[in-house]
Image (tube, rainbow, N blue to C red):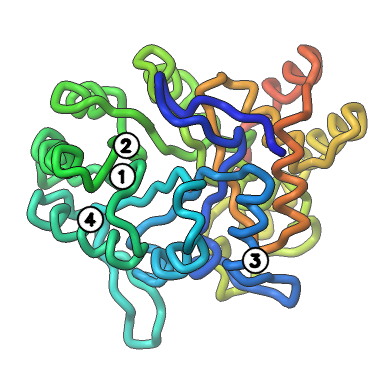
Amino acid sequence: MVPTRTLWKNGPTVGAIGLGCMGMTWAYKADEHSESPDRIIGHALDLGVNFIDTADVYGPFTNEEVVGAAIGSRRGEVTLATKGGLESHVGDAGEPVISGPNGHPDHLRSAIDDSLRRLGTDYVDLYYLHRPDPKVPVEDSIGAMAEMVQAGKVRALGVSEFTVDQLDRAQSVHPISAVQSELSLWTRDHLATSLAWTERNGAAFVPFSPLGRGFLTGNFRGSAPAADDFRAQLPRFKQENLDANMAIVDAVASVGHEAGATPAQVALAWVLAQGEHVVPIPGTRRSSRLDENAGAASVRLTPAQLQTLDDLPDPAGARY
């Protein structure tokens, strides 16, 4: 069983590694090794990987249905998180299109009810505002979400990709239990900002893409993502940047050789070392990768190895 952490101060006990479910239905191209969400989520729960993350925008909408069906009768074993506050639709060619943020209270009130219906549950343990809406004061969005807590639809509130100022404003309306932002060895922007804020305020920090969207595992050595893969649109995955960034992969692999761990486990162990309140949510469609990710929670890097990773250069190419 995977070691556990307390998700936020006085919060639920969860596996130190969670499971991000976005890629099960959206953004990343499946391959011949992909397994069904039922199998992956069932295996995750068997391992004690019980912090499950989804969002209404993934699919759009289908991810919550898939996750809810896969959890099924095991709802009591799961700390379930979902998100609202982005709008999306299916384009003319069948592709998912994100229209932009919508933090209006009426939209969020409708969004939580729709999410609960798709997930097949009457509450979620954690509900995030997926992105701040520049057209709506943070206080108004969080105020509507606080009503969900009072109504018993939501146990705790979180936010995603917020600045420290936005976090302070949200906290003034209702306690923020978790902050989700990207954090990995090639995206370290939040170390001194929102990560530090969560430590000061007793909240969880939940890194998405802790494996650098798969780059840090070495899976893209010598090849860029397929054209219909979301990552193909990202500057860091353009061939010229992939080539330049391979030195980061090599350094992670070298530390892994010393530590007796895979590159993925090294990358996750570094993220876990950023604080006991940090619970990353790598995604996967393979049971073998799930086992590998869960094993990272037992990897202990030495101070010298952590320093080597801390000293890695910033990657070539912008994040988006």
To which quarter of the image does residue 101 belong?
bottom left
Badge 3 crowding class, 10 Å Cα cut-off, few under 14, some 14 to 19, many 20 or more, is: few
Mark 3 or 2, nearer chain start: 3
User: Nearest the camera: 159 or 236?
Assistant: 159
Mark 1 or 4, nearer chain start: 4
- For the residues bearing labels 2 and 1, Cβ distance under 8 angstroms: yes
Query: Circle 3 sits on which residue?
Result: 39
Mark 4 or 3, nearer chain start: 3
Which element is circle 4 on? helix
Going 44% across and 38% down the picture, which residue do you hit? 181
Q: Which mark is residue 127?
A: 1
Using the numbered discs, state the Cα–Cα distance from disc 4 to disc 3 in whole angstroms. 26 Å
- For the residues bearing labels 1 and 4, Cβ distance under 8 angstroms: yes
Q: Is residue 211 visible?
A: yes
Which element is circle 1 on? strand
* Amino acid marked by disc 4: Ile
Query: Circle 4 sits on which residue?
Result: 112
Using the numbered discs, state the Cα–Cα distance from disc 1 to disc 3 in whole angstroms. 25 Å
Query: Circle 2 sits on which residue?
Result: 158
Above or below for 51 versus 167: below
- For the residues bearing labels 4 and 3, Cβ distance under 8 angstroms: no
Mark 1 or 3, nearer chain start: 3
The image position of residue 148, as x and y in percent, is 17, 44
